[in-house]
Image: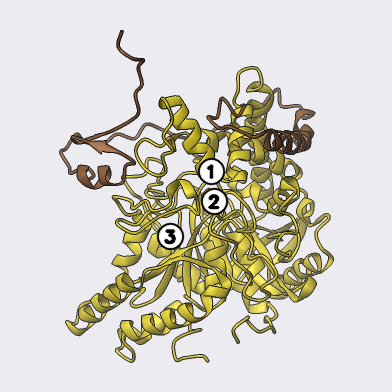
């Protein structure tokens, strides 16, 4: 799970979280027994519809201000570590 | 100790400022002086924005001098939970992963407060990313309860609740995903409101669980809470889940009384609460009945399953929402050999234990092979809870329950056992799952001489009746005969 969530855990943490998550999931057993065959799932409390707006030009966030808060930026872009292997 | 405007309500302060009996700047300085002196003990603020506060107070005074209308919150000090973004002012979510981040935009609610003449004093402490019920999960140290410094203020909006209770500001904003406004309001002896889902724009609220999150006010009176909610409510084109229903008129009917209203006490939420909390609900109910309401007990069976459904749904949504903290566009980056390693080391270093716990729980609930059994099942139980409420509201206008099962507990008491901490939200969670409004009104003292909160629940957009009942509960409530830590 930690791997999927992009987290790394020490052995000690792994032990602690395993116990705690098991207790939480165990508590959730009360709903596993419920008969919900006739119910539709609710993902959201409102009846969502697509919200559209007119395609009018409007200012967006200031690029320099946004980039000034990034861990690294260069030439008007976010900068990240190498994502591809070394060139052959 | 008490200076002239500290301790006054928002409406009173606005009236004094508008009628030029005191300047917004004086009000601001009086409140800032108390905060500077006393907050180092309470730790309710993460950041005090003195200069910006004085500047906005001066702007209010300048408007008044020119004969313009400064707005209904003229010169009223306001505290903001630090998960509401403020352009150019650090916004942390009490997390190391956002430490030092200065947002490039401002939340709609904050703009509305400024437009109404409110003066932002600073950003308040919270459980990291609003995940918790005690404000102990902050990575900047816990906030304490202003009635007993050894006890928690509740959470996750514990900083906002403590600040209002301590008279640092008459108003504050919080966010409520499973009770994070109502539960700390109850534990600190003040009023806290979670409005109908969609009534208040969430543009600029850092997302935790998007189908549940809602912004709402803290105040020391029901009327001040109504005033604040009217200021922040309303449609916002920048939030696609924002309702088009407009701003409700909460104040016109607030003193109409409860004659003829049908009020149901939720049996399932009275079961097992602390004895004095239970007694307070019974007394509040008799007071409402003496004021002309028709009060009866009602069973809303599915609310029993709220906690289990919530602790699958909210972490699932959180695991997805918090995927954005990857060390690329903002916040902490701990550089690794490649991108994947950078993600992992940034998140591992930046998130605290409760956030990691919920991200993993949510990742599990959504994972292939377990999705139907956990997340899917919880969504169906959510429908069951909505149906159960709907049935209750066929017979009742509003419902009544405790806000929290106990009064404020001691710091550290539940820190080692996440499940016991989660149980403090058992009375507040069902409302979020249904998208309904609910609020907490203080009702005297209970166990350990700490405040008790009565919860008033209403169907979607039922705020007008909810506030009428809240006002009636307030009228009949015993006072809090206890001194604050600085008194």
Between discs 2 and 3, the one toward the N terminus:
2
The residue wearing badge 1 is B351
List x then y, in percent, for residue B90: 37, 57
Q: Quadrant of residue B272?
A: bottom right
* Residue B129 visible in this rendered orientation of the protein: yes
| Nearer to the camera, B160 or B285 | B160
Chain the render paints yellow = B
Chain the render paints brown = A
Q: Is residue B330 above or below residue B5?
A: above
Horizontal relation, residue B436 to residue B27: left or right: right
Q: Secondary structure at mark 1?
A: loop
Would you call the spot at circle 1 few (<14 residues within 10 Å), some (14-19), or many (20 or more)? many
List x then y, in percent, for residue B332: 42, 43
Q: CA distance from mark 1 to mark 2?
A: 8 Å
Q: CA distance from mark 3 to mark 1?
A: 39 Å
Between discs 1 and 2, the one toward the N terminus:
2
Would you call the spot at circle 3 few (<14 residues within 10 Å), some (14-19), or many (20 or more)? some
List x then y, in percent, for residue B185: 60, 65
Q: Secondary structure at mark 3?
A: loop
List x then y, in percent, for residue B97: 46, 45
The residue wearing badge 2 is B128
- Number of marks in the rendered image: 3
Label 3 marks a residue whose chain is B
The residue wearing badge 3 is B248
Instruction: Single out the mark in the foreground, 3 or 1.
Output: 1
């Amino acid at each position: 799970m930690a791997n999927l969530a992009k987290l790394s855990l020490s052995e000690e943490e792994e032990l602690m979280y395993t116990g705690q998550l098991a207790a939480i999931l165990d508590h959730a057993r009360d709903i596993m027994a419920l008969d919900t065959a006739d119910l539709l799932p609710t993902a959201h409390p409102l009846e969502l519809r697509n919200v559209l707006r007119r395609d009018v030009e409007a200012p967006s966030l200031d690029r320099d201000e946004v980039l000034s808060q990034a861990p690294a930026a260069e030439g008007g872009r976010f900068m990240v570590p190498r994502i591809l292997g070394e060139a052959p | 100790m008490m200076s002239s405007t500290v301790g006054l309500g928002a409406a009173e302060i606005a009236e004094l400022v508008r009628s030029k009996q005191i300047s917004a700047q004086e009000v601001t300085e009086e409140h800032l002086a108390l905060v500077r002196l006393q907050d180092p003990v309470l730790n309710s603020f993460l950041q005090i924005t003195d200069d910006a506060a004085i500047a906005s107070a001066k702007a209010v005074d300048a408007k008044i001098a020119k004969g313009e209308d400064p707005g209904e919150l003229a010169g009223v000090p306001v505290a903001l939970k630090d998960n509401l973004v403020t352009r150019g002012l650090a916004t942390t979510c009490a997390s190391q992963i956002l430490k030092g981040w200065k947002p490039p935009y401002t939340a709609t609610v904050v703009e509305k407060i400024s437009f109404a003449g409110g003066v932002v004093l600073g950003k308040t402490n919270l459980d990291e990313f609003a995940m918790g019920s005690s404000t102990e999960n902050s990575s900047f140290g816990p906030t304490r309860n202003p009635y007993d410094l050894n006890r928690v203020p509740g959470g996750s909006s514990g900083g906002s609740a403590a600040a209002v209770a301590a008279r640092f500001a008459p108003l504050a904003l919080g966010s409520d995903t499973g009770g994070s406004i109502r539960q700390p309001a109850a534990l600190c002896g003040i009023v806290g409101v979670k409005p109908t889902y969609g009534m208040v724009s969430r543009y600029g609220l850092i997302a935790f669980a998007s189908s549940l999150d809602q912004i709402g006010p803290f105040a020391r009176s029901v009327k001040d809470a109504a005033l604040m909610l009217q200021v922040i409510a309303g449609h916002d084109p920048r939030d696609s889940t924002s309702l088009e229903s407009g701003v409700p008129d909460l104040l016109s009917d607030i003193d109409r009384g409860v004659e003829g209203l049908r009020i149901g006490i939720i049996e399932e939420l009275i079961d097992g609460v602390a004895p004095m909390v239970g007694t307070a609900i019974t007394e509040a109910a008799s007071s409402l009945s003496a004021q002309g309401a028709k009060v009866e007990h009602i069973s809303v069976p599915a609310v029993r399953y709220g906690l289990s459904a919530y602790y699958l749904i909210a972490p699932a949504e959180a695991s997805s929402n918090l995927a954005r903290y990857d060390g690329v566009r903002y916040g902490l980056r701990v550089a690794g050999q490649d991108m994947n390693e950078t993600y992992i080391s940034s998140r591992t270093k930046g998130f605290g234990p409760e956030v990691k716990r919920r991200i993993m729980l949510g990742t599990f609930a959504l994972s292939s092979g377990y999705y139907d059994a956990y997340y899917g099942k919880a969504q169906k139980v959510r429908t069951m809870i909505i149906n159960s409420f709907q049935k209750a509201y066929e017979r009742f206008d509003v419902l009544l329950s405790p806000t929290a099962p106990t009064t404020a507990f001691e710091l550290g008491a539940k820190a080692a056992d996440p499940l016991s901490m989660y149980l403090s939200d058992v009375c507040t969670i069902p409302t979020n799952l249904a998208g309904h409004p609910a609020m907490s009104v203080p009702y005297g003292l209970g166990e350990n001489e700490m405040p008790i909160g009565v919860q008033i629940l209403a169907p979607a957009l039922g705020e007008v009746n909810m506030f009428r009942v809240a006002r009636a509960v307030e009228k009949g409530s015993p006072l809090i005969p206890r001194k604050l830590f600085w008194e």
